[in-house]
Image: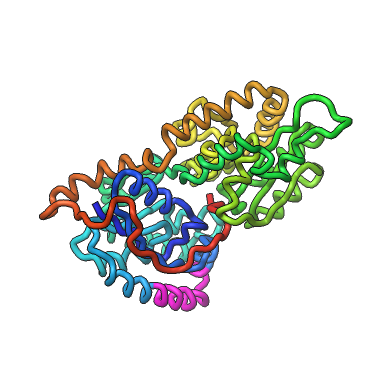
Amino acid sequence: MRVLVFGTYDAAMHPRVATIAEGLRGSGAEVIECNVPLGLSTADRVAMLTQPWRVAALLVRIIRCWAALARSARRVPRPDAVLVGYLGHFDVHLARLLFRRVPVLLDHLVGASDTARDRRAGGGVRGTLLGLIDSAALRAADVIIVDTDEHLAVLPDRHRGRAVVVPVGAPAAWFAAAASAAADPVAADPAAAEQASPGPAEAGPAPLRVVFYGLYTPLQGTPVIGAALAALTGAGARVTMIGAGQDAAETRLAARTNPDVRWLDWVAADELPALVAGHDVCLGIFGAGPKALRVVPNKVFQGAAAGCAIVTSDTPPQRRALGDAAVLVPPADPDSLARALLRLAGDRAELDRLRRLAGRLAADSFAPERIVVPLLRHLKPMLDERPGGPATGAPAGTVVAAVGPHGGTDGGQSR
């Protein structure tokens, strides 16, 4: 089977599509990449679509990228399926035009209208426009890929039969980071290791090392984290907060009384797994909005793969994905979050148990080859029905073509 991963996605910023591609390769598919990153974050795209005077600039960027994608598409072998990467609401139409009679798969991790509402920018005419963009993208796809049963349930009835749930998962780099950190904890994150090491006058266990990374969107509930950090002042926890965004100022203000918080605005994508693996606990999300109750964030999958214990909100999709391999606290409840971290700071045996459970769960369920199983099962009958069946060509798992720059951005901190 030959799959073309196509579009203006940025795998460094949003690793979801790269994880799916990695899983397809690991499952024996031939993967071709045709990618020209648009160079805009989710926030940039939402802003452009909701501010009419910026739409022209967005269209110019899209046209330039599409011209390069079209030229590249003419040079690649004919695929059996085209996977349009995350934020491909427009790209899916180009894929439909260029690859007629080839199944087009849309990675519909989130809708444009849903994202705008979560970021408090999706009401009125704006919301209607973004809803129309979502609807057109869904109509253009043969297969719609979502990440949770909850996101499947909110798809319009007419599209739900073409959808398949594929968890976000974690790329292999995160599992490798866990192995490296276990072999050399100081090399994983020297600053965190130095923070966690008791001084000559200190006694007792090393401080609990906690990490969060993200874009500080309402979904992530970072002000809740900030309030919890204030309650942890002097409690033996060293915290690394990575990222910047909408709620960053409010979060810093809430945590201002705690001197044991390290604030990093940005970490390169290739450095993030090792940095996270140098901590004991990875925080998930704590928002209470509708979108926050429907997702399992990438940091939960990645943190578990990196060997951290997971502390996140108790929502149906996260409870289903994590079970007893994580500490789940009520959404939007900083006191419960602070109490959970205090318990782990004082109980090293429980912390180690949770780290082992999370690591085993990640290996069993979150690895790239695991998450694509439902997608492959969904695709097989579609491809078997085509004349000649799936294509063969270059050795399985190779990248035949790639277009465009791939630089680090925010290390996949989007959700």
Q: Position of residue 286 (x, y in %)?
A: 59, 41
Front position in the image: 307 or 45:
307
Front position in the image: 297 or 127:
297
Q: Position of residue 108 (x, y in %)?
A: 38, 53
Q: How is the image coloured?
A: rainbow
Secondary structure mostly seen in the magenta stretch: helix
Q: Is residue 292 visible?
A: no
Residue at point 33%, 59% (across, down): 32
Q: Is residue 86 left or right of residue 250?
A: left
Residue at point 60%, 52% (across, down): 271
Q: Is residue 46 above or below residue 278?
A: below
Q: Which image quadrant for residue 313? A: top right
Q: Is residue 76 above or below residue 386?
A: below
Q: Is residue 359 above or below residue 8?
A: above
Q: Position of residue 306 (x, y in %)?
A: 55, 39
Residue at point 47%, 31% (across, down): 361
Q: What residue range appears in magenta?
A: 48-65
Residue 51, magenta (yes or no): yes
Front position in the image: 387 or 198:
198
Residue ranking furthest to the right? 201
Front position in the image: 257 or 298:
298
Q: Position of residue 74 (x, y in %)?
A: 27, 72
Q: Is residue 2 visible?
A: yes
Q: Which image quadrant for residue 283? A: top right
Residue 57, magenta (yes or no): yes
Residue at point 61%, 35% (across, down): 183
Q: Is residue 128 left or right of residue 315?
A: left
Number of labels in the image equals: 0
Q: Is residue 152 left or right of residue 185?
A: left
